Each structure stands twice: as C-alpha cells, then as structure tokens.
Image: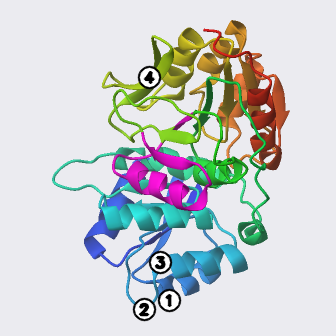
C-alpha cells in the first residue's frame, strides 16, 4: 500500500511492544518503523525515523512519559496515541496527556479482556490526519467568567465530544460561571477514565462537575459527565425536574456512551429550553441527535473545522443542517451561555 502510516511504538515492556506491533500489523495501511523502551531511545528514534504517529506509555524509566510528551509537543509536535493501564493512576496520567496534546488513548488489555485496545488501528488512522494544536495555547491565562449577575433560563446545556474533546471541554467550561446552566456531557472515553476527567474538570472549572448517577437532578451550577464505556447518559423529565438516567443498552452510532442518545433524550424531555453543542471528534455520533434538538426548537452550536482536532462529528452535524452556529472553540462557551440566557423557562 502506498504511503502507509509510519508508527513508532514506545513502551518499556517488550511484551507490550510486541502486542502493539502485532495489533498494528493487521492493517496494511500502517507500518511500524521502530520501537523504543524508554523516552531517551524514543527521542533518537523520532529524529531518525520521523514517524507519523507515536504510541506512548506513561510509566517508563529514565524520563516520565508526561514529561517526554510535553517536550515532544513543544519541540517537535507529533501525533501521539497514549497506551494506558486501566487504573486510577493510569487514568489520571492519561487525562494529563490528553491536555498536553496527545490525540487519543486506548487502555492496555488486562485480565484477558481487550477492552478498547481493538480500536487502536482506527485511532492511529485518526491521529495521522488530526490537527495538532498550538502548544502555546496550553499556557494561555484563563478568561474571566461572567460575574454573579449571570442568569440562565435554559433547562439544560448538552455537550458532545470525542477525539480532542478533553482540551475542547476544558476550554469551553472555563467560561462557565459557578451558577452556570444545568449541563450534561457525553465524551467518548474508556471506562474508569471519566471519573478522573470529572475530577479534573471539577478542580479547574467554577461549577461543580461530577460523573452522572441514576436519578441525579439537573441543577444550576452542576455539570454531569456520562460514565465512560458502560452506560448511555439520558435526560428525562420527572414532574417539574429533569434528571439523569443511565441506560446499559448496546452501543449507538458505534459508541457507549453515545452523544446521539443524550441529544435525542433532551429533544424529547426539554425541546425548546435547551442548548446543544457538538465538539471535535471522529465519526458521526451526535449529528442525528443534534438535528432532533434543533428541529424540536433547541439552540445548536458546532465547533468549526479550524479549531477541531478532528472535524468529523461537527462536520456531520453541519451537513445534516443540525447546526445553527459554527464557531471557533474559544467562542463556544460564551455563545452557549448567551443562548441559555435567552431561553424560555420550563417549556418542555
């Protein structure tokens, strides 16, 4: 095959390197050009081999994987897919890696279960064509959030994201004040990782952020994140309240949790008092659901191509006519807040 994707595999375990190489060998569009046991070897291999994509473990000798990633993204930006252990420590480090510029992550097989490791080939292809963001933007000072005079009349703001979503969500939510509209999020992420991501957002954002739980009531100043990999997050109306429900049904649009499931539930529960936002991500998940929201009377916003790591989901939504406003990432938070402030109260 002409011009296969050149991949460098970096992991201190020879067994894991062999497993990754065997997995990638199944795709003729990928060629593993080298392997390295630690960041020092990887640095020399990158100079020599000029890979298109690097797979990177976090816990390695001689240099912490996060430190290596930070240097790589600053000095020689290269698409990176993290290969992480499915532990709390591994999840926390992976969230930091995604903030530093890693394109995506997969969990290492554990206990005889592949988990999402079988998605590695697809994620390599996405990483090879992804848009790398400006490293300097990582250190930009956070913008001021609206003062206490902000008032939302919307029932809910719903946000969907996938590849590149960690940085995108942190960027959007840093505009949200402590009394932000009730907000629900579906981000494609492996099981166990969303607990760490919710904690990270809770530490860095003014509102309270936590994983969604069955029956949790949507409230001003609260943001709920769909648990990764196990259930879909839906919103249902119970009397005057909107509540989170968790559905253990099979994947929808190829994902669980699915953005389509979340958006469709809001189109039914609060059609004219909601704001829908679709951010960077591969595939089409969320496009159909966002169209349902718009047709039901919700305000809808999509991220633009220039600021998307992967313009798959926002493009699909725009192609369907689901997006009212297509905006660069830095403008989406303020736009969602303005739309929420103009909503009709309690129309469902």
What kind of element bears circle 3?
Answer: helix
The segment highlighted magenta reads 183-211
With 209 as the anchor, is 294 left or right in this view?
A: right
Asked if the residue under mark 2 is in contact with the one under mark 1, i.e. CB atoms within 8 Å, the reply is: yes
Q: On residue 252, which mark appears? A: 4
Q: Which residue is mark 1?
A: 40
| Sequence order check, earlier mark of 1 and 2 | 1
| Sequence order check, earlier mark of 3 and 1 | 1
With 7 as the anchor, is 145 left or right in this view?
A: right
With 97 as the anchor, is 342 left or right in this view?
A: right
Q: CA distance from mark 3 to mark 1?
A: 10 Å
What kind of element bears circle 4?
Answer: loop
Q: CA distance from mark 3 to mark 4?
A: 34 Å
The vertical placement of 63 against 272, above or below, is below
| Sequence order check, earlier mark of 3 and 4 | 3
Q: CA distance from mark 2 to mark 4?
A: 42 Å
Q: On residue 62, which mark appears? A: 2
Q: CA distance from mark 1 to mark 4?
A: 42 Å
Picture coordinates of residue 321, whole percent (x, y): 77, 16
Residue 207 among those drawn in magenta: yes
Disc 1 crowd, CA 10 A, few/some/many (<14, 14-19, 20+): few
Relative depth, front residue between 234 and 168: 234
Q: CA distance from mark 1 to mark 2?
A: 7 Å
Picture coordinates of residue 189, whole percent (x, y): 45, 45
Q: Which residue is mark 3?
A: 65
Q: Residue at x 51, y 76 (%)?
A: 66
Residue 275 among those drawn in magenta: no
Asked if the residue under mark 4 is in contact with the one under mark 1, i.e. CB atoms within 8 Å, the reply is: no
């Amino acid at each position: 095959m002409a011009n296969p994707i050149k991949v460098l595999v970096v992991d201190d375990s020879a067994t894991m390197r062999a497993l990754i190489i065997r997995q990638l060998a199944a795709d003729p569009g990928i060629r593993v050009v080298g392997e390295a046991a630690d960041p020092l070897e990887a640095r020399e291999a990158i100079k020599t081999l000029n890979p298109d994509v690097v797979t990177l473990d976090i816990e390695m000798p001689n240099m912490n994987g996060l430190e290596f990633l930070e240097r790589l993204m600053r000095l020689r930006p290269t698409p990176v897919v993290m290969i992480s252990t499915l532990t709390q420590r591994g999840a926390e480090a992976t969230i930091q890696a995604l903030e530093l510029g890693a394109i995506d992550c997969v969990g290492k097989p554990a206990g005889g279960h592949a988990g999402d490791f079988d998605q590695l080939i697809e994620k390599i292809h996405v990483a090879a064509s992804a848009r790398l963001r400006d490293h300097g933007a990582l250190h930009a000072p956070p913008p001021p959030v609206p003062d206490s005079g902000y008032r939302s009349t919307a029932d809910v703001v719903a946000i969907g994201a996938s590849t590149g979503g960690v940085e995108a969500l942190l960027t959007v939510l840093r505009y949200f004040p402590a009394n932000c509209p009730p907000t629900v999020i579906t981000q494609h992420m492996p099981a166990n990782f969303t607990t760490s991501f919710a904690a990270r957002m809770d530490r860095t954002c003014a509102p309270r952020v936590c994983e969604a739980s069955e029956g949790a009531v949507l409230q001003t100043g609260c943001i709920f994140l769909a648990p990764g990999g196990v259930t879909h997050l839906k919103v249902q109306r119970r009397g005057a309240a909107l509540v989170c429900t968790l559905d253990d049904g099979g994947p929808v649009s190829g994902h669980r949790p699915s953005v389509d499931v979340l958006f469709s539930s809001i189109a039914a529960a609060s059609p004219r008092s909601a704001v829908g936002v679709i951010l960077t991500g591969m595939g089409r998940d969320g496009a159909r659901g966002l169209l349902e929201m718009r047709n039901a009377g919700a305000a809808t916003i999509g991220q633009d191509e220039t600021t998307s790591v992967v313009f798959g989901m926002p493009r699909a939504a725009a192609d369907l006519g689901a997006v009212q406003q297509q905006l660069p990432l830095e403008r989406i938070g303020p736009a969602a807040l303005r739309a929420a402030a103009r909503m009709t109260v309690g129309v469902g």
